[in-house]
Amino acid sequence: MSDDAMSIPHLLAHCELFTEAPDAIAHLRRFILDLAVRGKLVRQDPKDRSSSEVLSELGISKTNKGPFDVPESWCWSNVGSVAETRLGKMLDKSKNKGEPRRYLRNVNVRWFDFDLSDLLEMRFEDSELPEFTLRPADVLICEGGEPGRAAVWDGRESDIYFQKAIHRVRFLDFVNSHYFVNALRASADDGRLREYFTGTGIKHFTGKGLARYLFPLPPMAEQQRIVAKVKELTTLCNHLEVSLARRAATRSRLLDALLREALKPSERAADAAAG
């Protein structure tokens, strides 16, 4: 593990000294994900079975060449080789039959989470339910809007399906869904994800683009360590963000109080002149 990785807890513990910029926390989150997908966030364990070996045994294509260097125990793979992908159901009121059921739209999928406060319904026939059902660990990815925005379904509610504007991705059991969404967000942050979009004006992340998307794949045990460390550091970022917001609010209140005090002499003089 590099010195960069070793310094992260120290960095977070002292970053209030250099987080005056409005987007400082956002930059810090991007930095964490960038280290994560380059193998610099947690230690490599020589006892971990390499991802190249796992893919080779299964006859799955992979490559050791990618946009940047990764540790020897990692490899590069594309989504089409390690997952089953499916677009959701087309919304067509004139053709849709069956019982009304809730479904996810593009707007319901946020980065790393879901907003279920405004779910709509469309008709699904019983025979369609297995095709469009959601399981825990499914990754839901926006095809348009903000292409690539994604979250891992956690099974928080049942009997919810998904619309055609969303890809459902089910990985083979050697890919951690949460690790993948971290890698996807890192690609969105550094601009690499745009290489897989189509369209000159409005961009779309089509099924073909998704299948081609190349991402760095660590050993499964390291993926789990990365996910845990990213969660830990993201929580610290959240706490820091709240702390900075409170400090800014306190500054604002103090400034208001100072302004009121500064204006009082003028107000008294105006009152005296009027009297």
Image: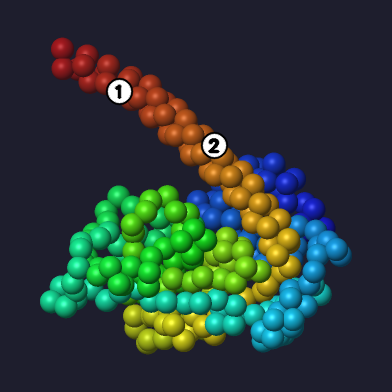
Q: Is residue 82 visible?
A: yes
- Residue at 56% x, 40% y is 239
Q: Quadrant of the C terminus?
A: top left
Q: Circle 1 sits on which residue?
A: 266
Kind of residue at badge 2: Ser
Q: Residue at x 42, y 82 (%)?
A: 206
| Image position of 206 with respect to 179: above or below | below
| Label 1: few (<14), some (14–19) or many (≥20) C-alpha neighbours in 10 Å | few
Q: Give the secondary structure at mark 2.
A: helix
**CA neighbours of label 2 inside 10 A, class few (<14), some (14 to 19), many (20+):** few
Q: Percent x, y for residue 21?
A: 54, 51
x, y percentage for residue 151? Answer: 47, 61
Image quarter in which the N terminus is found:
bottom right
In the image: residue 148, left or right of residue 201: right
Which marked residue is nearer to the observer: mark 2 or mark 1?
Answer: 2
Please state the horizontal and vertical placement of residue 244, each as a whole percent of the image. 53, 39
Q: Which one is nearer the viewer's eye here, 22 or 168?
A: 168
Q: Mark 2 or mark 1: name the one nearer the start of the chain.
A: 2
Q: Is residue 237 above or below residue 76?
A: above
Instruction: Examine the rendering and report whether any part of residue 145 can be seen.
Output: no
What residue appears at the point 58 percent right and 41 percent down from the top-left corner?
A: 240
Which of the 4 quarters of the picture holds residue 40?
bottom right
Up/down of 167 relative to 273, above or below: below
Q: Amino acid at mark 1?
A: Ser
How many badges with numbers are in the image?
2
The residue at which mark 2 appears reads as 243
Q: Could you say whether the residue bearing mark 1 is in a helix, strand or loop?
A: helix
Q: Quadrant of residue 191?
A: bottom right
Query: Nearest the camera: 131 or 201?
Result: 131
